[in-house]
Image (cartoon, rainbow, N blue to C red):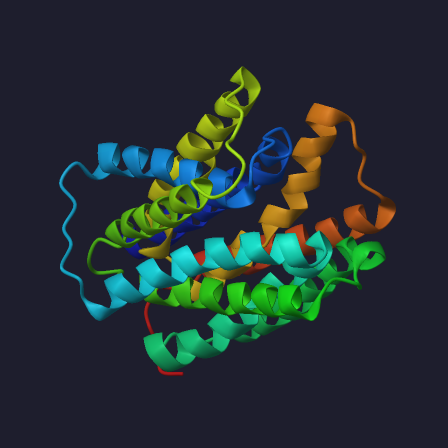
Amino acid sequence: MDITKRGTIIGILAMVATALLWSIAGLFIKVIDWHPLTIAGFRSLIASFVVLLYVKRPHFHLSFPQVAATVCNAATMMFFVAANKTTTSANAIILQYIAPVCTAFLGAWLLKEKTRLEHWIAIVVVTAGVVVMFMDEIGGGRTLGNVFALLSGLTFSLYFVFMRKQKDESPIESILLSHWLVAAAGLTVTLFVPAPRFTLKAVGAVVVLGVFQIGVAAVLFAAAIKRIPAVTANLIAVIEPVFNPVWVFLALGEAPGAKALAGGAAILIAVTLVSMISARRPNKPEPA
């Protein structure tokens, strides 16, 4: 196996692990009775220490891709929190996961990474799978919340693109800066909302979120995005909502319905196939 293909496989595996860690958010957030922005602030503060422990000496050159990825990641986290407060959870998830479509076009334009036939097929199947998963919950919600969800989808896709833009550098500093931004915003809001109750369960959950769900995940994502195209990484990320109900079922016994299982199966099959095909191709940028 040549070095390029080995790197692609490592990138795919790192992205799968990232998505699995991202997916535990719903389970642990359920047990924290704090304001959402307070959770986001403490979670990002803890995650920043994890990233610093890994990087040791971060290099902030403040290039356009580094700053853009920072702002887009911070905006995604904030928009998604706002969306979950002002529209239904299903609307927020579905509208955010328009990101692979945006990444396909933005990646071709900004990264010159060709979106192949298997990517387009996977995008269609994944989109259908997400809709099927949350079909019974779609609808309702406020227009403003849906706008926040759409914005989070756009900024999420731009985050992948600008992180990928740093593939020849060190993209993890963008994640560190974004966590500092979210921590500053979230903890500032905490001063003006009801004070959080620091119970053992709540503190333990927010530590798990900070250390693993976005801390270790940040290290894995930075490794993945250096090795695989942005659209491939974004498609793999869609397994996050598939595994979220799995963890809730294992921990709390809330069984997913038939539609959730069918939609999740479609997503997993599409992501697995596109990952296998990507692993067989040289990881070289091509003209769009």
**Image coordinates for residue 241, horizontal then vertical, percent:** 64, 48
Q: Is residue 93 visible?
A: no
192 and 205: which is toward the camera: 192
Q: Is residue 41 left or right of residue 133?
A: left
Q: Is residue 198 left or right of residue 124?
A: left
Q: Is residue 170 left or right of residue 16?
A: left
Residue positioned most to the top:
200
**Image coordinates for residue 27, horizontal then vertical, percent:** 63, 33
Q: Is residue 209 visible?
A: yes
For residue 74, above or below residue 201: below
Question: Which residue is located at x 56 percent, y 19 percent?
Answer: 201
194 and 46: which is toward the camera: 194
Location of residue 225 (image quadrant): bottom left
**Image coordinates for residue 92, horizontal then vertical, percent:** 65, 59
For residue 53, above or below residue 11: above
Q: Is residue 204 left or right of residue 3?
A: right
Question: Which residue is located at x 56 percent, y 39 percent?
Answer: 25
Quadrant where the C terminus is found in the figure: bottom left
For residue 4, above or below residue 57: below
Question: Which residue is located at x 48 percent, y 70 percent?
Answer: 103
Q: How many marks?
A: 0
Location of residue 72 (image quadrant): bottom left
**Image coordinates for residue 264, horizontal then vertical, percent:** 72, 50
